[in-house]
Image: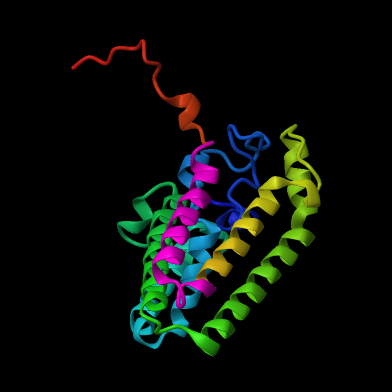
Amino acid sequence: SLPPIQLFMGAFPNLFGNVLGGFAASFGALSLTELSFTAGIVALALASLTPWSTPARRHAWFWIAVAVLAVMYMTADATPLGRLGFHMPVLGSFRASGRAGILYILAVALLAALALGSLQRRELAGARLRRSLSVALTAFALIVCALYFSYGSIVARAQAAHVAIPDFLHNKAVWLPILLLGLGVALCACIPRWPRIASGLLVVLVATDVASFGWFYEWQRSTAPKTVEVAP
């Protein structure tokens, strides 16, 4: 299961280390492959805009519920839902509750797609778009503040694993997602005026955001070498 403090990985995927890319060695819970639920901070910001669009709202609440329930189940015995899941028929027989992160990623992806469609059709524009972006930025600012005050616990976990990590202000696992978020918000604000150009750049930014974790992940070292022949 996913320790609650590692929920920060939803916005800061490299916070608990990675394999390559100049990040610290992984020091989070074991089996990071099963516990990773990275959808990207840009996609998460897009998803947060969906409830502000009236046409998209009727679809949004279902996927918001899926995302919330998935995160609660991922943390297993840290939440009542996680504890209940272990006593339910069929569901209780599954191991690795952290794999529920797949449902979270799916929900965020669909919510982001709904938001992008609303932006392109100008269903979310003008004062409503400005308000939604302001609320989203405020929410992410609170997450950053929570991370700042929790950073001492993260450093302690790293030290217990004999891993050195930079201080908060110099940790690129912190400021890189913040930079990507700023670019994403700027592009969202530009979509009603320049829909094709801004949408295309936003898609590239989302891919870059996800790649900032996935490209440096363990597949770089765990894949079979080219000299190994796999029997048919």
Residue occupying image coordinates x 50% and y 49%: 208
Residue 39 seen in render: no
Which residue lies at the image location 62% right of the left edge and 55% below the top edge?
Answer: 177
Q: How far across and how far down the image is residue 218, in percent?
A: 50, 32
Residue 143 visible, this angle: yes
Position above or below: 140 against 98: below
Q: Nearer the viewer, residue 58 or 135?
A: 135
Where is 91 relative to 34, above or below? below
Taking 37 as reference, is 130 left or right?
A: right
Is-magenta flag for residue 37? no
Q: Bounds of the magenta span?
A: 189-216
Q: Quadrant of the C terminus?
A: top left
Q: Main secondary structure of the magenta part?
A: helix
Taking the view exactly as shown, the residue that stands out farthest to the left is 232
Q: Position of residue 184 (x, y in %)?
A: 55, 64
**Nearer the observer, 121 or 41:** 121
The percent coordinates of residue 182 (x first, y second) are 62, 64
| Residue 7, image quadrant | bottom right
When the figure is inspected, residue 200 is found, relative to residue 160, above or below; the finding is: below
Q: Position of residue 20 (x, y in %)?
A: 59, 32
Residue 215 included in the magenta stretch of the image = yes
In this picture, residue 121 sits left or right of residue 157: left
Identified at 66% across, 76% down, the residue is: 138
Task: Identify the residue at horizontal 72%, vertical 60% (top origin).
Answer: 147
- What is the number of callouts on the image? 0
